[in-house]
Image (cartoon, rainbow, N blue to C red):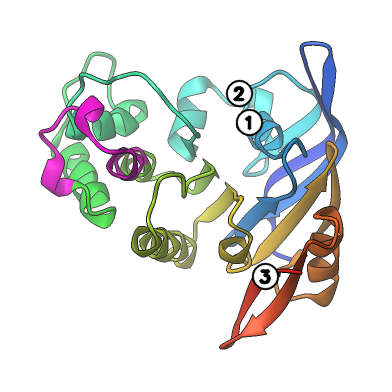
């Protein structure tokens, strides 16, 4: 396994009165795409948010070889790009200005965007096929259009570590395929991607799979490993089965 882009040791999270994560250990290999899957309530989103330093936790997290608390907010924002689910706000901002928010960690305080920022924004929006509505307010976009703008914002950061929670929400199958291509391009360029996914067949395209259940990691392994498939089937109560179809792994109802 390659070096870890993110490490968690004994990670526990309590939200309200409920302990959502129970002493999780996790190693996310760098230069690969890791998919986190599991049934509803397994703790997938909470785990990703804890790694991203977005919720309080007990235990230890290191990112890109450094203890997470040692990072300044600016450093972390330059090195880690986040795409959350059901993000709200900025409804009146033009799409291009929303994407430009991804460049803030690289800009001087109150500094205007420079040519490099403009190039990064246009490149990210063209990559997600959202450039055509760059001058439309975010609130006027459809769910799928909005999701592509938010993905462009994450890509515009240019961060090596890309964390995505349910990134396929509201995307139709062709744009899901585009997302898959974008993730692969990020990894092939040396980056690391981690995504929480409900779409199990799409998750099986990843390099590594983390299978969660009831706030714990029950298995981590390559997506092509039989042990990974069995763990996946088990946490879903054997209501799905992993098959090979046309040279790809797919999850079908059992």
Q: Image point 39% across, 40% down: which residue? A: 154
Q: Which portion, as a residue range, is magenta?
A: 131-150
Mark 1 or 3: the one toward you: 3
Q: Which residue is mark 1?
A: 49
* Residue in the picture at 37% in, 56% down: 172
Image x and y of residue 239, in percent: 79, 61
Give 96 or 60, whichever is nearer the viewer: 96
Residue linked to disc 3: 252
Residue sitting at the far front: 254
Sequence-wise first label, 2 or 1 = 1
Q: Nearer the viewer, mark 3 or mark 2?
A: 3
Q: Residues within 10 Å of mark 3 (few under 14, many from 20)?
A: few
The residue located at (77%, 39%) in the rendering is 42
**Lower position in the chain sequence, tag 3 or tag 2:** 2
Secondary structure beneath dot 2 equals: loop
Q: CA distance from mark 3 to mark 2?
A: 34 Å
Magenta span includes 143? yes
Query: Quadrant of residue 142 in the image?
Result: top left
Which numbered marker is on residue 54? 2
Residue at (76% x, 22% y) in the render: 57
Q: Position of residue 163 (x, y in %)?
A: 54, 43
Tell whether label 2 touches label 3 (CB within 8 Å).
no
Q: Is residue 97 left or right of residue 23?
A: left
Q: Is residue 103 left or right of residue 25?
A: left
Residue 110 higher or lower than 201, as above or below = above
Residue 224 image point, x, y percent: 71, 76
Quadrant of the rendered image containing residue 254:
bottom right
Q: Residues within 10 Å of mark 2 (few under 14, many from 20)?
A: few
In the rendered structure, are the residues bearing label 1 and label 3 in contact, judged by CB atoms less than 8 Å apart? no
Which quadrant of the view contains residue 227?
Answer: bottom right
Distance Cα–Cα, label 2 vs label 1: 5 Å
Q: Does the CB distance between marks 2 and 1 fall below 8 Å? A: yes
């Amino acid at each position: 396994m390659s070096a870890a882009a993110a490490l968690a040791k004994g990670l526990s999270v309590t939200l309200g009165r409920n302990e959502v994560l129970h002493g999780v250990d996790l190693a996310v290999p760098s230069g690969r795409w890791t998919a986190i899957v599991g049934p509803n309530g397994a703790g997938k989103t909470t785990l990703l948010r804890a790694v991203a330093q977005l919720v309080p936790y007990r235990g230890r997290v290191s990112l890109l070889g450094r203890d997470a608390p040692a990072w300044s907010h600016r450093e972390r924002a330059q090195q880690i790009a986040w795409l959350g689910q059901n993000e709200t706000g900025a409804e009146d901002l033009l799409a291009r200005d929303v994407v430009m928010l991804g460049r803030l960690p690289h800009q001087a305080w109150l500094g205007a965007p420079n040519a490099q920022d403009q190039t990064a924004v246009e490149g990210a929006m063209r990559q997600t096929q959202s450039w055509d509505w760059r001058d439309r307010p975010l609130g006027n976009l459809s769910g799928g259009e909005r999701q592509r703008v938010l993905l462009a914002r994450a890509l515009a950061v240019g961060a090596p570590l890309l964390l995505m929670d349910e990134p396929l929400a509201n995307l139709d199958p062709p744009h899901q395929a585009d997302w898959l291509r974008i993730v692969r391009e990020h990894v092939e360029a040396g980056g690391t991607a981690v995504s929480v996914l409900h779409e199990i067949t799409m998750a099986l395209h990843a390099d590594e799979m983390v299978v969660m259940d009831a706030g714990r990691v029950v298995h981590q392994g390559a997506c092509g490993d039989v042990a990974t498939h069995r763990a996946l089937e088990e946490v879903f109560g054997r209501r799905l089965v992993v098959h090979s179809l046309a040279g790809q792994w797919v999850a079908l109802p059992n």
